[in-house]
Image (tube, helix red, strand yellow):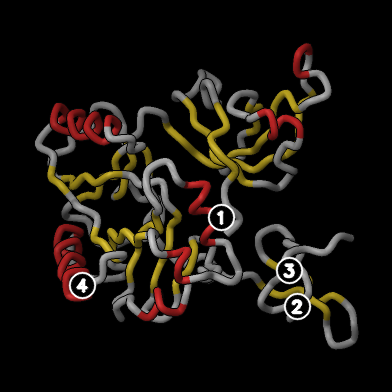
Amino acid sequence: MSTPPDHPSCSGRRRLLLGAASVLCPAVDGRAAPVRAPEPPPMPLARDWSPGDDPAGWLASEKFDGVRALWDGRRLRFRSGREVPAPPAFLARLPQEPLDGELWLGRGRFEALSGLVRRATPAAADWADLRYLVFELPGAPGPFAQRADRLRRIVARTDWAPLQAVAQQPVADAAALRGRLDEVLRDGGEGLMLHRADAPWAPGRNGLLRKLKPLADAEAVVLGHQPGRGALAGLAGALRVRADDGREFDIGTGLSAAQRRAPPPPGTRITYTHRGFTGHGLPRFASLLRVAPTF
């Protein structure tokens, strides 16, 4: 059995993920003992914006291609629950209040960001251009509009350039929403997030938080690989994947030449785009967007 990357519970050994729940670490008697992986923190998750929905009463913001991170006043954690290996100087500047947001390097720089925030030994200089774009106060009372206003005050009081409150803008109607989306796309952004202005904080996919993009996206787990044919003989022709709702299908587009030579192994989470669904409920024109970071 191969040995996995370092895990904080394994004192210099390497880890092996067992599903999504545990790792193997050496026990005192030399045998491998399971250790529970961190629990994902509760957080609001977005559903897709539906065509024809009325945006009145919603607040829109840019959807940033960053890495979700939650600050609890003491620790900065990824969506998985694992701690972000951030420089101590960065953490020391964050306020006491819990925050929810995205670590971000800039439009189109997700791959560089992903590598940066995974470094086990972070350097403050490497984080100099990184921003923590915050949009929510986890567990705070009141409607979202009030929480967003309080968040702006917290950020202003902190007065530290890397910490920024995401601008939330009301949209009067569908035409205004389309105009806002077009503006973000022209500037190289990937879409919009919409929060119900009167919504309480609530974790999960409850419809109070939506995303609007030219292409819908979702995540799936790689089950295996379909062999390529013709010009792709000897390479991966497609990924066989399973979506979170249990549907299985193939993704044959969006793979780079390197990914066709060495495709993501089974068990890898990927993000894919699609254009709605077929009559059988499968994603239409599914295309690999990226391999989901293993945070």
Q: Gap in Å between the C-alphas at discs 4 and 3?
A: 40 Å
Secondary structure, mark 3, is strand
The amino acid sitting under disc 3 is Val
How crowded pointer 2 is (Cα within 10 Å; few <14, some 14-19, many 20+) is rated as few
| Label 1 vs 2, first from the N-terminus | 2
In the image, taking residue 284 as reference, residue 226 lies left or right, namely right
The image quarter containing residue 171 is top left
Callout 4–callout 1 Cβ contact below 8 Å: no
Q: Which residue is mark 4?
A: 159
State the residue in front, 119 or 99: 119
CA separation, marks 4 and 1? 27 Å
Pointer 1 local density, CA inside 10 Å: few below 14, some 14–19, many at least 20? few
SS at circle 2: loop
Kindly identify which residue carries mark 2: 12
The first of marks 4 and 3 along the sequence is: 3
Q: Amino acid at mark 4?
A: Asp
Task: Please say if 91 is above or below 103.
Answer: below
Which quadrant of the rendered structure holds the N terminus? bottom right
Residue, disc 3: 23
Residue 70 can be seen, yes or no = yes
Q: Position of residue 260 (x, y in %)?
A: 72, 30
User: Can residue 281 be seen in this snapshot?
Assistant: no
Amino acid carrying label 1: it is Gly
Give the residue type at disc 2.
Gly
Counting residues from the N terminus, which is met first, the one under dot 4 or under dot 1? 1
Q: Which residue is mark 1?
A: 115
Local crowd at mark 3 within 10 Å, few (<14), some, or many (≥20)? many
Assess whether mark 4 and mark 2 are in contact (beta carbons under 8 angstroms). no
